[in-house]
Amino acid sequence: MREFSHQSWPKSKAEASRRQKETASQIRLLPLDEEPHLITAVETVYGNGSDVLYACAVTMSFPELEEVERVFAEGPPGFPYVPGFLYFREGAVISQALSNLKETPQLVIVHGHGTAHPRRCGLASHIGVVLDIPTIGCCRRLLTGHHRELPPTKGANQPIMLATRQVGVAYRSKENVKPIYISPGHRCDLPDAVSIVQRCLRGFRQPEPLRLAHLLANKLKQRSEKKIRVKPELAEETA
């Protein structure tokens, strides 16, 4: 896995746009070389005030989905909030978390989009290109494009269309629950991306590795932001 913790980060939207176009030109969408036996999911949550970002990367065996490793990172967002440029805001903290892994992931599921992006280069695509590993984007909200209404049954799906091109799949992972949005990031095609996410479902809306990463990132936030209040009488006793 390539190191990407020492990247320079853009200082303006114009620079971020240029960098994103360069990355988009390097994206390769093709079937997986082989089925992974280790899958990593990475998720971030913002601290109170959104001035700190907490990240968790969880590696699980596949297809058994038994936890192998979990690592954490935290730090300030690297870029202002601008829709469509999430990588430059969260990439530094995500990179730190992934760099902490002892086991190199064979595929990363990212809570973000891959090709289902206005410039077809979302967070998952950026991470895939920079690390040169297969990535999949799986998100709870649609960023761009459109799809037909899904039936309420589990497994219902519709293509996400951007102009005349399919860029992802809207997939109902649980009956009567809002769909998730799946798109390939890099070194993975759409059929493989959908298949991997389907096989990672364990009765919840999100695939299990991503669900666990989300829970653990929130626990990190709660632990880091918990304020320990000492009663005045205890403070006097320990003075």
Image (spheres, rainbow, N blue to C red):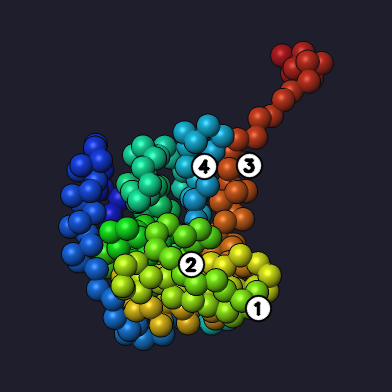
Q: CA distance from mark 1 to mark 3?
A: 35 Å
**Residue type indicated by callout 2:** Tyr
Earlier in the chain: of badge 1 and badge 4, it is 4
Q: CA distance from mark 4 to mark 2?
A: 21 Å
The three-letter code of the residue at mark 1 reads: Thr
The label nearer to you, 1 versus 2, is: 1
Residue assigned mark 2: 181
Q: Residue at x 35, y 74 (%)?
A: 166
In front here: 34 or 147? 147
Task: Tell me, for residue 153, which label it has, or none.
Answer: 1
**Mark 1 or mark 2, earlier in chain:** 1
Say whether marks 1 and 4 touch (CB < 8 Å): no
**Quarter-wise, where is residue 66 in the image?**
bottom right
Locate residue 34, reporting x and y percent.
Answer: 36, 86
Of mark 4 and mark 2, the one earlier in the sequence is 4
Residue at position x 47%, y 33% in the image: 51
Q: Secondary structure at mark 4?
A: strand
